[in-house]
Amino acid sequence: MYIESYTRFLEDDADAEAVQAELREAFRLYDKEGNGYITTEVFRDILHELDDNLTPEELDMMIDEIDADGSGTLDFDGNIYEKLNIIFSLIL
């Protein structure tokens, strides 16, 4: 779901706010417990689903980039939106 929104953003030059809203909704779908965050393990699974050729080292680098504070959780805020753009540009 994240990747579909990001791809649409790249291809259609969609409104950035609309894309962010779609990403926020996709994030909520993965936040099954409704805690307002997903774990880095869940995010690792998402990245692996998007590109199963990613090595464990590449996944670690991406996780380290997006979880800069090392908390093991990812909150959907302005910073994560920008970081998702970086991550998706690496795997697209």
Image: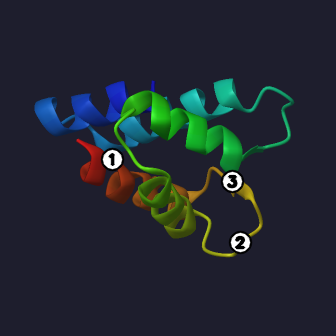
**Residue 83 percent coordinates (x, y):** 44, 60
Residue 33 - label: none
Residue 70 - label: 2
**On the image, numbered disc 1 is attached to which residue?**
88
Residue 20 to residue 73: above or below = above
Which residue type carries mark 3? Asp
Q: Earlier in the sequence, mark 3 or mark 1?
A: 3
- Residue depicted at x 41% and y 60%: 82
- Residue depicted at x 27% and y 38%: 15
**On the image, numbered disc 3 is attached to which residue?**
75
**Residue 36 percent coordinates (x, y):** 78, 43
Q: Is residue 86 left or right of residue 11?
A: right
Kind of element beneath mark 3: strand
Q: Residues within 10 Å of mark 2 (few under 14, many from 20)?
A: few
Determine the CA span between mark 3 and mark 2.
Answer: 12 Å
| Quadrant including the C terminus | top left
**Residue 16 percent coordinates (x, y):** 32, 44
The residue nearer to you, when weighing 79 against 56, is: 56
Determine the CA span between mark 3 and mark 1.
Answer: 17 Å
Kind of element beneath mark 2: loop
Q: Residues within 10 Å of mark 1 (few under 14, many from 20)?
A: some
Kind of element beneath mark 1: helix
